[in-house]
Structures are given as structure tokens and as C-alpha cells.
Image (spheres, rainbow, N blue to C red):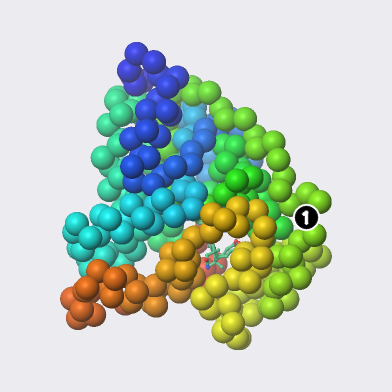
Amino acid sequence: MDIGTHPENAGERLAAALLPAGLNLWGVAGAAAWDAQMSPARRTDALSPGARSILVFGNGGGALWDAMLADLRRDPRGLTEEQHPIDAFVARAVAAADPVLGNARRRWFWASAEADLHIDFRLLAGMAGMGVQSRLGLLIHPAWGTWIGLRAACFVDAELPVSPPASVDPCEGCPAPCVSQCVGAAFVGGRWDVDACARFHREADPCERSCASRLACPVGADRRYSQEHYGYHAHRASGRAWLREHLGIPPGADRYEGVGPHWGDWRARVDVKGA
Ligand code: B12
């Protein structure tokens, strides 16, 4: 591996290169610690032999959304020619920043449900010190709350300084308005249950465009996604329609209608464990 004169700073250099794209959160997990938690199909031997560190990148708040909007204003094909404009924007930003790593052997992974190969990003980002597991099941950051997205991870054959674990658990001592505000009875024993939540999503529509529990969380409440940004994640068809309108694109000029999130059939599509 050769990632320049100060290989230990490779994370900082990559993070600086990705910041203009709104990827303003990052951390490093150790490959050995990751392997200790994984089944053979998701260990570094299988994913990226020789990897010693894992760089994880995400966004806190609206920085990524705003950067993507600015990019789409410059070139609307980032929407009209892409089924998943956020993922496509992140992939372009990573491709532009990646040369910072020089000759280091590396492999990138994506957090999107449509990725070729899935890994458990919430677990990985927790190991990279980017937050802790919340009652809501989401990774929660002491400042950004649950308003963070996990986007990309780079398995690299360099030994980078591992990020310290998040020292605060914001859920500790919280009266848990997430639980009391849930209209779908999705909290079982005080913790979010994906099956209960998905069942409600299939049967009723009050949660179709936003989640009362996530909105009730007091942590990072002032850093919530904007209505359009959140709406896009919660319901891509209407979110995409807003994007077209915002950019002045007639529906006929867009190749896609917008699909997801896949509440009904995610198990058939995504396998983060590689069983
Ligand atoms: C499939 C998927 C879904 C499915 C099923 C989700 C599920 N089971 O949790 C559906 C479509 C329902 C879904 C919905 C949403 N999702 Co989703 N989803 C994914 C995806 C692609 C894979 C997750 C998966 O397969 N899990 C399956 C099993 C293994 O999960 P599990 O049974 O809950 O158990 C695991 C966790 O407990 C975890 N875990 C273990 N230790 C730790 C430690 C920490 C610190 C944490 C946080 C977790 C954790 O490991 C367990 C076992 O492996 C990930 C991206 C990725 N590659 O990770 C995004 C992801 C988890 N989703 C995300 C989001 C934001 C959402 C939504 C809010 C989207 C929306 N509608 O607005 C909702 C709500 C989900 C919620 N309250 O958790 C974000 C979470 C960001 C964050 N702050 O944590 C992710 C990481 C995508 C991203 N780009 O950021 N999602």
C-alpha cells in the first residue's frame, strides 16, 4: 500500500475531499473488530482481502441533499437518468475523491438497498464511532440525532487510527417520546420492531410520508431534514415529483417514477449478513 507520505492521515484527506458533496460525517472501524462480529461471508477475507481499516462516510442533516440539489441544477440528468439520484450523486463524489488513496488496495461498498453486495451499515458506523443504536433502531448521533444517513464504506489495506466509540447514549434517561408517539404499535418491549412497523406500513398510510416517532425524538431536533428531503426518503415517488417540479423538469422528461422504500419485500432484496 502507498497512500502518500502520511498514510495515517488518509482518512482526513478523503473526508476533506468528500465534504463539498455534503458527506460531513465519517469514522474509521478496525477490520479485525468488524471480522469478529461477522459471519464468514461478510468478513474482510471475503469482501476485501488484506483490508485493515474501514472508512465509513455519511451525512448529518441536509448537507448532502443541498449539495445534490445544487448539482442537479447544474445538470438535471443526475435525476432524469438515474433511478436513485442520491446514490448516483454519492457514487460520483466518491469516484472523484477516491484517487486521494493512491495505490492502497481498497474496495468501496454502498448503503443503498440496491447495492450489489450489502453490509450492515448501522453496525459498521457504530463501530466507527459515528453514533449508537437508538430505541428507534436507527443510529443516533449526539448532535445530529437520527438525522444522519450512511452512504459509503471503504475497506482499505492501511492501518488507520480507529475512531473512539461514541461516548454518549442519547436514549439513556430519555422519556422516549418516540415510543409514545408511534401510531403503528411498532415498539415491542420499548424497542422498534421492523416487522411490526412494516406490517403497519402495508395496512395503513399515516406513516407513508413521515414517521411520528422519528419526528418526536428531541435529539438533533434543530437539525432535522427539510420536509422535501425527508419526504423523498419516506416516499420516493412523491419526493421525485417534488424534485422535478423544483428543477422545472416535465414528468415526460424523467425516465423514472421513483420506487421505495421497500417496506413489503426488503427481506427478499437485501441480505446484510450474506447468509
Ligand atoms: C433493508 C433496509 C430497510 C428495510 C428494513 C430495515 C431493518 N431491518 O432495519 C426497510 C425498507 C423497512 C427500511 C426502512 C427504513 N430505513 Co432502512 N435500510 C435498510 C438497509 C438497506 C439494510 C438493513 C438491513 O438489511 N437490516 C436487516 C437486519 C440485519 O437488521 P436488524 O434485524 O434490524 O438487525 C441489525 C441491527 O440491529 C444492527 N445492529 C447491531 N448492532 C448495532 C449497533 C448499532 C450502533 C446500530 C445502529 C445497529 C446495530 O445489526 C443487527 C443485525 O445485523 C440499510 C442500509 C445497510 N446496508 O445497512 C438501510 C438503513 C438501515 N435504513 C435507513 C433508514 C434511514 C430507514 C428509514 C428511516 C427510511 C425512511 N422511510 O425514512 C426507514 C425506517 C427504519 C427504522 N426505523 O429503522 C438508514 C439508517 C440511518 C441511521 N440513522 O441509522 C440506513 C443505514 C440506510 C442509509 N443510507 O443510511 N430500511
In which image quadrant can residue 235 be found?
A: bottom left
Question: Could you tell whether 156 is left or right of 223 in the image?
Answer: left
**Image quarter hosting the C terminus:** bottom right
The residue positioned 65% from the left and 34% from the top of the image is 165
> Foreground residue, 275 or 96?
96
Residue 116 visible in the snapshot: no
Task: Give the x, y percent position of residue 264.
Answer: 54, 76
Residue 43: percent from the left, percent from the top? 53, 39
**Dot 1 alpha-carbon crowd within 10 angstroms: few under 14, some 14 to 19, many 20 or more:** few
The residue that appears at 32% across and 18% down in the rendered structure is 4
Quadrant of the snapshot with the N terminus = top left
- Whether residue 37 appears in this view of the structure is yes
- Picture quadrant of ligand 1: bottom right
Q: How many marks?
A: 1
Query: Residue placed at 33% from the left, 52% from the top?
Result: 67
- Among all residues in the image, which is located at the extreme top? 5
Residue 15 drawn above or below residue 245: above
Q: Which residue is mark 1?
A: 174
Q: Kindly identify the residue that appears in the image at 59 percent across and 71 percent down.
A: 211
* 237 to the left or right of 249: right
